[in-house]
Image (cartoon, helix red, strand yellow):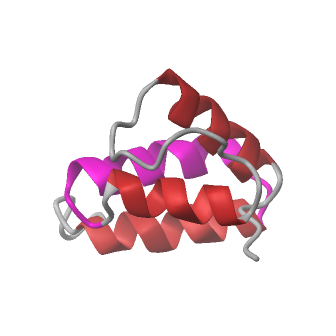
């Protein structure tokens, strides 16, 4: 990230590491930046959170307040997958 702050996949990797290290605030920030950089699409993240049971809304690719709240809960739980 220090060498190339526009490399979105690095933010996703760091977000995953922060989830495992119980650092949800940083993980959420990194996931949002990865989305902004196009490394992950909002609907993909919604689907992942829905599979884990944290997102109940429509899978529509619109990352609004409901998606952000689900992302916060999901990361606080360590970004579990099913």
Picture layout, residue 2 above or below residue 54: below
Which of these two is toward me, 4 or 41?
41
Give whichever of 44, 10 is nearer the camera: 44
Q: Residue at left 33%, top 47%? A: 61
The residue at 66%/42% (across/down) is 56
The quarter in which the N terminus is drawn is bottom left
Residue 74 placement (x, y as % from top left): 72, 50
Quadrant position of the C terminus in the picture: bottom right
Q: Main secondary structure of the magenta part?
A: helix
Q: Using residue 75 as the reference point, say whether residue 15 is left or right of it.
A: left
Left or right of 67? Residue 41 is: left
Q: Is residue 33 magenta?
A: yes
Q: Image height check: is 9 above or below 6?
A: below
**Depicted 43 relative to depicted 17: above or below:** above
In magenta segment, residue 44: no
Q: Which residues are magenta?
A: 21-39
Q: Which residue is most to the top?
A: 65
Rendered location of residue 17, percent (x, y):
63, 71
């Amino acid at each position: 990230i220090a060498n190339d702050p526009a490399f979105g996949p690095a933010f996703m990797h760091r977000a995953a590491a922060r989830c495992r290290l119980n650092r949800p605030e940083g993980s959420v920030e990194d996931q949002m930046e990865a989305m902004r950089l196009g490394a992950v699409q909002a609907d993909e993240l919604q689907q992942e959170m829905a599979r884990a049971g944290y997102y109940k809304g429509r899978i529509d690719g619109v990352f609004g307040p409901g998606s952000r709240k689900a992302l916060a809960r999901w990361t606080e739980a360590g970004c579990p997958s099913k």
